[in-house]
Amino acid sequence: MKRHITLIAVLLLVCVVFSGCNTYTTEETPEATTPPETEEAPPSEETAEETEATEEVAEEVSKTFTFVKGGDVITLDAGKAADNMSEEALYYTQAALMRNFHDTYLPDAAEDFEISDDGLEITFYLRDGLVWSDETPLTADDFVFGFLHLMDPESANAGANSYYVVKGAEAYNIGEGAAEDVGVSAPDEQTFVVELAYLEPTFYDTIKALNPIRRDYVEEHGSSYGTSPETYISSGPYIVTDWTYEQSVSFEKNPLYWDAASINITNLEWLTIVDQNAQLNLFDTGDADGMQLPSGYAETYADQLVISYQSAAGNAIQLNFSNPENPDAGEVLANYNFRKALSYAIDRAPMIAAMQPDYVADSRLVSDKTLTPSGQTWAEAYPFEANPVEADSEAAQQFLADALDELGYGSVDELPAMTFLLFEVPTYRTYAEGFLDAWNTVLGLNNIEISVLPIPQAIQAGMSGQFDLYLQGLARGSDPYSMFQMFGIGGAMNWGEWDEMQTYTDMLDATNEMLDQEERFDALFEIEKFFDENGYMIPLWSYGGSMVVKPDLNLTGYGVSTFDTPTVSFVYADIIPDSQR
C-alpha cells in the first residue's frame, strides 16, 4: 500500500486535532454519546409525493435556529474543502452517497450499496427522484464528476491522497494520468461504481461521504465555484441563501431534498464570532440560540440545555528513537522500561481535570468509543490498560530502575540531555511543565528541557526528526487503521526510525487483505498491543466539550458524533413549542 506525507497535510491534521487552530476547537472532532432526544427525529423513507404534501403544511411553520461558530466557512467547493467548517456547511447542503449521523452511516442519495467478493469494486445504487435545488435531475454522473473534481490537480485538495486506492486516482492527481483512466463510472443514471487498485477496507467508509458536484456550475464559474450562494447549488437538506464572509451564513430548508419531510428547522443561521467574550454576550442577550461552551463555564450555564461530547482526537507524547543530533537520547527512549517509566509517572486524569475538565484521560491509543463489528465498543471487545490514567509512582520507579540497569547507567544523572519540542501555545507549555514536574518528582529526572517554536517551524522540525520528545495531536477515525497507518513506514507521523518499524508496517498491511471485519479488528488489536510494546507514542487524553442551547427552544433530534464533522448536528433537529410538549 502507498502512503504519502506533505507539510500541508500535516498542518491540516494539526488544525483538526489542535485546540489552538480556531476558537471553536472541540467542534472539530466529536462524541458518540446518544442523547434520548436524537431518537425522536429519524430520517424518513417517504415518497417524493408524500414529501411535497408534507412541505405544503410545513411551510406554514417557520423555525429558525441561530448558532455561533468560532470560525467561518472557507469554501463550498467539495473538491477543495479540507477544513471542518467547510465540511460542516457541505454536510447541511449536499446529499452525500450516505449521511453520517451519530457515527452511523444512513442512506442518503444512495439507498443501497454492495461490495464485490474480492473487495475491489463498490457499487452504489441511487434512489429514484433525486434533484438539485433548481429541479435538475441528480444522477450518478454528478458523483463521477464530484470524484474527478476532487482528484483534479487544479483543485489541490490536501486530502486527495486518501482516495489513491481508487484505480488511476493517484496518477491523475499528480498530473501523470488522465481523468478517463480513473476508476469511477456511471453505467446508468442511478448506478455509481468505484474500482479499487488494491484492498483497503477503511476506504469503504471514506467513499460513502462523497458529495455530488454539478459539472456545468464548475465550468461556468471556474475558481469562483462555491465561493458565494450565486456560484453554488445544493442537493441536500438546506440551501445557502446568504454568506457574508467572516460574519454569517444563512441556510434555508430545501423543499426538493429527497428527505425534506425529516427536516424540521426551516432556517439555520451561522454567526461567525471569534472572540469568546463576544460569543458569550451574544448568547446571554438572546441573539444566539446555541454556542460552544467555553471550558470552566459549565456551572454558569447549568440551567441551559448542555450537549456534551467526547472527541476521538486528542494528544500524545511522541518519542524519537533516531534523532541524528542526539543518538544517545534515542537509545534511551527506545527502551521499553524507560518509556513506561515516563508514562506511569504522569497523573493524566487529575491533571486534565484541573486544566480541561471536558477532556478524558486515555490509557491507550485507540479511542474507547470505537465501535467494533460485534457492536461492542473497542474498550468492551478488547480490554487493555496499557497505561494508568492516574500516576503509579511505585511502578514508574521500578520501570526506571530496570531501564537504567538494561542501558548501563548508574543513575539518572548520567542520562543524556533531551529536548521536548512544543508549539508556541501557552496550554502546550503548561502541559509540558506538568510532565517535567512529574518526571522530576517521581523519577528524579532533570535532563529534559522544553523547546518552543511557532507551529509551522515546530512541525517542520518534527518531520525532520529534530526532537527527542514532541507533544503530538492525534486524529483518530472510526476505524483504528486510520490512526495506525500514520505510524508505519511512509506514515504521516512516522518521523524517525525504530527497530520494529518494518514488522509493524507488514502487520498493518496484512489487515488490508482481510475482508472479514471481525478478523481484521482482532488483528488491529494485536497491532495496538505490538505498538504499545515497541512504538513511540505515549497516550495522554481525548478532547471533549459542550454546546449550550437555550432551554426554552425545547430542541430535540440533534445528533452528536465522536469521529465525524459536525460534532453536533442539527440536520434532523426540531424546535418543539410548549403547547406540543
Image (spheres, rainbow, N blue to C red):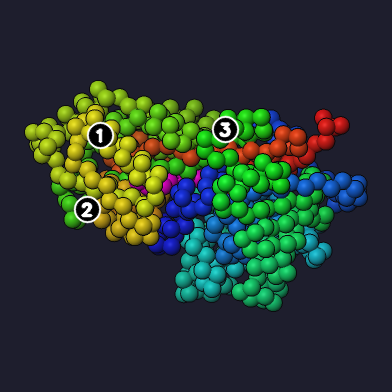
- Residue 63, position in %: x, y? 81, 46
Q: Is residue 157 above or below residue 479?
A: below
Image-quadrant location for residue 522: top left
Query: Which quadrant is the C terminus positioned in?
Result: top right
Residue in the foreground of this view, choosing between 93 and 153 = 93
What residue is pinned by disc 1?
Answer: 439
For mark 1, does the 10 Å Cα neighbourhood hold few (<14), some (14 to 19), or many (20 or more) residues? many
First in residue order: circle 1 vs circle 3 = 3
How far apart in space, not on screen, are marks 2 and 1 (Cα)?
21 Å
Residue type highlighted by circle 3: Ala
Residue at (74% x, 46% y) in the render = 65
How far apart in space, not on screen, are marks 1 and 3 (Cα)?
32 Å
Residue in the foreground of this view, choosing between 270 and 7 = 270
Q: Which residues are magenta?
A: 471-481
Residue type highlighted by circle 2: Asn
What residue is pinned by disc 3?
Answer: 298
Observer able to see residue 187: no
Observer able to see residue 194: yes
Q: Secondary structure at mark 3?
A: loop
Residue at (71% x, 47% y) in the render = 287
First in residue order: circle 3 vs circle 2 = 3
Q: Is residue 443 magenta?
A: no
Which is closer to the viewer, label 3 or label 2? 3
What residue is pinned by disc 2?
Answer: 323
Q: Could you tell me if the residues under marks 1 and 3 are in contact, i.e. CB atoms within 8 Å? A: no
Q: Is residue 194 left or right of residue 385?
A: right
Q: Is residue 421 left or right of residue 130?
A: left
First in residue order: circle 2 vs circle 1 = 2
Q: Is residue 60 above or below residue 463?
A: above
